[in-house]
Amino acid sequence: MATISGVRAVAGALLRAQGRGAWRTLSAASAAPQQTLRSQTEKHEGMFKVTMLPGDGVGPELMHSVKEVFKAAGVPVEFDEHHLSEVQNMASEDKLDEVVDSMKQSKVAIIGKIHTPMEYKGELASYDMRLRRKLDLFANVVHVNSLPGFKTRHNNLDLVIIREQTEGEYSSLEHESVKGVIECLKIITRDKSQRIAKFAFDYATKKGRSKVTAVHKANIMKLGDGLFLQCCEEVAELYPKIKFDTMIIDNCCMQLVQNPHQFDVLVMPNLYGNIIDNLAAGLVGGAGVVPGESYSAEYAVFEMGARHPFAQAVGRNIANPTAMLLSAANMLRHLNLEYHSNVISDAVKRVIKVGKVRTRDMGGYSTTSDFIKSVIDNLHPHYGV
Amino acid sequence: MIPGDGIGPELMLHVKEVFRQACVPVDFEEVRVSSDAAEDDIQNAIMAIRRNRVALKGNIETNHNLPPSHKSRNNILRTSLDLYANVIHCQSLPRVLTRHRDIDILIVRENTEGEYSSLEHESVSGVVECLKIITKARSLRIADYAFRLARDTGRAKVTAVHKANIMKLGDGLFLQCCREVAGGYPEIAFDSMIVDNTTMQLVSRPQQFDVMVMPNLYGNIVNNVCAGLVGGPGLVPGANYGRDFAVFETARTPGFSPAWWCCPRSCCRRRSPGSRPPPPGSTAGRARRPASCGGGEGGVSDPLPSPRPQ
C-alpha cells in the first residue's frame, strides 16, 4: 500500500514538473536545439553555433585539434570562443555571464577543464562549479567504452556512469566553527535525487540498457544517502522492465577493479561519481580516451570524461586528443549531424585500431599533431584501401 | 576475540586451529556482539578490549534500514577506544594471479572523524545536510602516525590523498597538517594527489605508491580499490591502532556471502603484524610462515577469490 501511494506521489510530482517545463526527457532535449537551430540556420547560412571554452592546461591544444578535424571534414559548425580561467586570472562574474548568454543562444557547448586552484582565495565555489550551477547541468554522463584495437587489462567494457552534478559534497559550504575544527556540509535534496534517478532510468530505456545500479554509502550517511537511495527506489518502480540494484561505494570500487563487466548503468551522487568516473577511465586507458557530457533541461555540454588539466603536457604536443574528438563526435550527433559524427568517430577508431600512430599515454611515440594528421587522412572513407 | 557476523565465526575457528597447531601462546577471550543486539553487548566488548589491550575482530554488519539513531557498532568501537589509525597493507602475493604485479602499499586512514561523524539532519523537508568534520589536532596526529610508520618500516615516500580543490577549507586543513609534519621528516619524500587522480593511477600504475595517508571516506574507497587489485578482501590484513589499544581485522567490506569467500589467509596474516602490544616475535614468525607457504604453493585448497557472484 505504501509503495502504491509512493509511486502515485512520484508520478504526480513528475507530471506537475513536466507541466512546469522543468524536466525534459533526452529525446525532447535533443529535439529542442534542433528547433531553435533551424531558425538560426536561416541566419547563419547553414552553420550551427557552438560555444567553446578551451579552459586550462592542454585544453587549448585539444580544442585546436577539434577545429582542425572539423575544418578537414567540412563540418558546418561555427565556434564562439570564450576564455574563462581561474588560474590565469581571466575569470570574473562578467565573463561568466557572457558565457551563459552565449549558451542561451547556442544551447550546446564544448569545454575543456577549467582548473580549480588549491589555495583558498576567498571564494569557496570554483568557477567550474558556478558555471555548472548557473546552467543547471545536473547530469554528467560518462560512457566508458573499450576502444577496439587498444588492449588494456580489461577488454570489452561498456559502462555508463551517471552522476548528479550540482549538489552533494560539492556544495562549497564550509566554515570554521571553532578554531582548528572545520565543518563541510554535504547537501542531498529529494528533488534533485529524483531528477537524476529519472534521468538515469530514461537514459537506460532510451539506449536499451537492462540494469541500473545506485551507488551510495547509506550505512554511514543514513539520512543523506538514505534519501538518495529512497528516491532511486521510488523512480525504479515506474520502470519495471529495467533491473534496479544498489551497491555501497567501497564494494563497488572493488568490484570495478576485479569484475567490471557486471555493471551496466551506474547512478550516484557527486563525489562518488567523480571517483568512479576516474577509476573507470583508468580501466580503459586513462583520461585521454573517455569522452563525457553534461546535460540540463535546456543545455548540453560536451567535455572529457575524466577532467584533468594535465598541465605537465602543455606545449609539449603529447596530449591525447581521442577523448576530445569522440566528445566532439557526440556533440555532432546531438546536433543531428549524424553523417559528420560517424565520419569523425570512425576515423578516430580506425587510427586506434590500426595502432601505428599512438600518443604516449597509449604506449606509442607519436605527437598530438601526428595523431590529428592521421585522423584527417582517415576521414576519407577509402583511405588505406 | 570478537567473531562478528557473516563469515566471522567461521574464520575465527580457522584462526584458533592454526594457532593451536603452531603452539602460539595466545589465549582468546571470546565476546559475542551481533548487529541487532542491545547496547550492552558492545559495551562489554569495549570493556574486554580495555582489559586485554589487543583484539581480533570480524566485521559487525550495519543494517542501514534501521533508524539513524542506531549507530554503527564498528563506529562505536572505534570512537570509544580512540583507534585513530587504520592501517592496511596491500601486497601482491606470489602465485596469486592478478592483473597487477609487485604492489606493496601501506594505506593509513584517519579512523575517527571526517565523513563518518554520523552528524546529519533534515533542516527543511526534502533537504538533508551531512556534516564532514576535519580537525587540526586529529589531522596532525594521523599525519605524524603515517610518517613514523614510514620511518619505522623503512619506506621512502608518503602520499597524501585529498580533494582540496573542492573542499578548500576542510581538506585544505588536512593537507596543510600533512605538510607541516612532513617538514619534520626530511628523509621521507612527501607528495599529494587528488583522490580522483589517485584512483585512476591506482588502476593503471599502482607500483608508484608507497605509503598513503588520507581522511576517512577516501581511505575506505582506496582500501577497497587496493584490496581488489591484489586479489580481494580475503587477502588483505588490516589493523586499527590507538594510543593504548590495537584491534586487528580484515579490510572492511560488507555483504559477502560466506560460501565463496571464506579465505582464512587474511586472519592468519593479520595476527602477525602485531609488533606493538604482545604477541612475541617468534610465535608471530611461526604463524606467518604457514600463511605465506600456503600462498606460495598455489595448490593449497583455499578458494582464491574469483569474483563470480553466487
Image: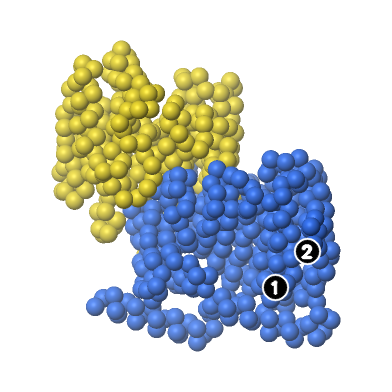
Q: Residue at x 31, y 41 (%)?
A: B261
Mark 2 crowdedness (10 Å alpha carbons): few <14, some 14-19, many ≥20: few
Which residue extends farthest front? A385
Which tint is chain B?
yellow
Q: How many numbered circles does the render carry?
A: 2
Q: Quadrant location of the N terminus of chain A?
A: bottom left
* Residue mark closest to the camera, 2 vs 1: 2
Mark earlier in primary sequence (2, 1): 1
Mark 1 crowdedness (10 Å alpha carbons): few <14, some 14-19, many ≥20: some
* Residue toward you, B227 or B21: B21
Say which residue label 1 marks: A338
Residue A121 visible somewhere in the drawing: no
Q: Residue at x 19, y 51 (%)?
A: B36
Callout 1: SS = helix
Against A197, residue B176 (above or below) is above
Residue A47: where, in percent of width, then height? 80, 77
Callout 2: SS = loop
| Residue A303 lies in quadrant | bottom right
Q: Residue at x 65, y 50 (%)?
A: A149
The amino acid at mark 1 is Glu
Work out how far the residue at label 2 is from the one at label 1, CA to CA, in angstroms: 15 Å
Task: Tell me the chain of label 2.
Answer: A
Residue B192: where, in percent of width, then height? 58, 37
* Residue toward you, A11 or B38: A11
Residue A62: where, in percent of width, then height? 76, 55
Residue A20, disc: none
Which tint is chain A?
blue
Task: Tell me the chain of label 1.
Answer: A
Say which residue label 2 marks: A381
Q: Quadrant location of the C terminus of chain A?
A: bottom right
Same chain check for tags 2 and 1: yes
